[in-house]
Amino acid sequence: PYDVLVVGGGPAGASAAVYAARKGIRTGIVAERFGGQVLDTLGIENFIGTKYTEGPKLAATLEEHVKEYNVDVMNLQRAVRLDKKDYVTLELENGAVLRSKTVILSTGARWRNVNVPGEAEFKNKGVAYCPHCDGPLFEGKDVAVIGGGNSGIEAAIDLAGIVKHVTVIEFAPELKADQVLQERLNSLPNVTVVKNAQTKEITGTDKVNGITYADRETGEEHHVELQGVFVQIGLVPNTEWLEGTLERTRFGEIIVDKHGATSMPGVFAAGDCTDSAYKQIIISMGSGATAALGAFDYMIRN
Ligand code: FAD
């Protein structure tokens, strides 16, 4: 059996694997796609200590760093079941069952897509999901935020301080964000809110140049010229496969304590799949380190 088995090869998992391996204990990492969301990212400017890097480059250095140590890397393997007997057991899609004294779950999350024409085509070419990451790229430009929940309105307030103008597009007749956020939003001069509107298409040539939405009452279509679209309709943790095993929030996020421990003894979690505040590379790496140290602590006590 392993001492520490990490599930997920994003920044959280890579960090957990390095921290575990440096304790000289038997460490393995199972990843469906080593690199995780970082592989889908173009420019990264908020990874402190590195002024600028690109996703695929950072993903390669994560893998390189993990391989510096004696870690079993099982890439392109999907975990499908977690169980606890004497050991924690992890079943893979290919039928293999791995055993470990401790497991660190770091399966990340995915942004919910609006699934309209142009979204996939212009990803990283005007279509963005993270205002903290990509907001500054749109300085002085016009953008839209799709989604009027808390994350959408927070994004709109954040962006309004950077860009020229923000159009918020909400599907429902009312915004769902907290009242205090709505009040803050309404106080801003460069924000327009469109409610009861269905996004139809993100338009562009080589980059985004506009968005088309339909008024859901009249069916009338409107087109707004702009350079960026932030999709803010939810971040979904990759934890469906854990249904019925350990405690998760109503959004599916794994609940962890300050040592990264979950409700299942010996099982820890880190990164975007947990209920941690804010989902960022540097934050997930920190929580990966926490979970590895937490797992090590657990091992020497049990
Ligand atoms: P992830 O990166 O999601 O990694 C999850 C890992 O788990 C992957 O290896 C995946 O294949 C694996 N996995 C999932 N399910 C299973 C399973 N069942 N079995 C085995 N493996 C599984 N953050 C920043 O700080 N700066 C930025 O500039 C930035 N830009 C971004 C741009 C985009 C387009 C996106 C999508 C995100 C961006 N982020 C950015 C957010 C950042 O990428 C995430 O916060 C970070 O990657 C989270 O790391 P993680 O390790 O928790 O999860």
Image (tube, grey):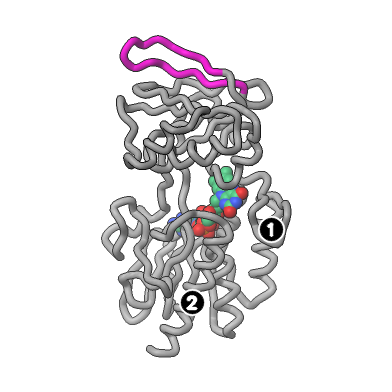
| Residue 255 visible, this angle | yes
Report the span colored magenta.
209-224
Q: Position of residue 260 (x, y in %)?
A: 42, 71
User: Looking at the image, is 129 positioned above or below residue 220?
Assistant: below
Q: Main secondary structure of the magenta part?
A: strand
- Position of residue 65 measured from the top left corner of the image (x, y, whole percent): 68, 68
Asked if residue 119 lies in the magenta stretch, the reply is no
Q: Residue at x 60, y 29 (%)?
A: 164
Sort mark 1 into few (<14), some (14-19) or many (20+) by Cα contacts within 10 Å: some
Element at label 2? strand
Q: Secondary structure at mark 1?
A: helix
Which residue in the rendered view is the most extreme toward the left? 244
Mark 1 sits near ligand 1, with its Cβ under 8 Å away: no
Q: Position of residue 170 (x, y in %)?
A: 39, 28
Residue type at mark 2 is Val
> Which corner quadrant holds the C terminus?
bottom left
Cα–Cα gap, marks 1 and 2: 22 Å
Picture coordinates of residue 119 (x, y %)?
53, 30
Q: Is residue 262 left or right of residue 56?
A: left
Above or below, comparing residue 21 to residue 113 in the picture: below
Q: For mark 1, what is the residue? A: 60
Nearer-N-terminus badge (1/2)? 2
Q: Which mark is residue 4?
A: 2
Q: How many marks?
A: 2
Callout 2 crowding tier (Cα within 10 Å): few <14, some 14–19, many ≥20: many
Residue type at numbered disc 1 = Ala
Q: Which residue does the image show at 47% across and 43% down from the upper left? A: 111
Q: In terms of image quadrants, where is residue 28?
A: bottom right
Say which quarter of the image contains residue 277: bottom left
Query: Does residue 249 appear left or right of residue 212 in this picture?
Result: left
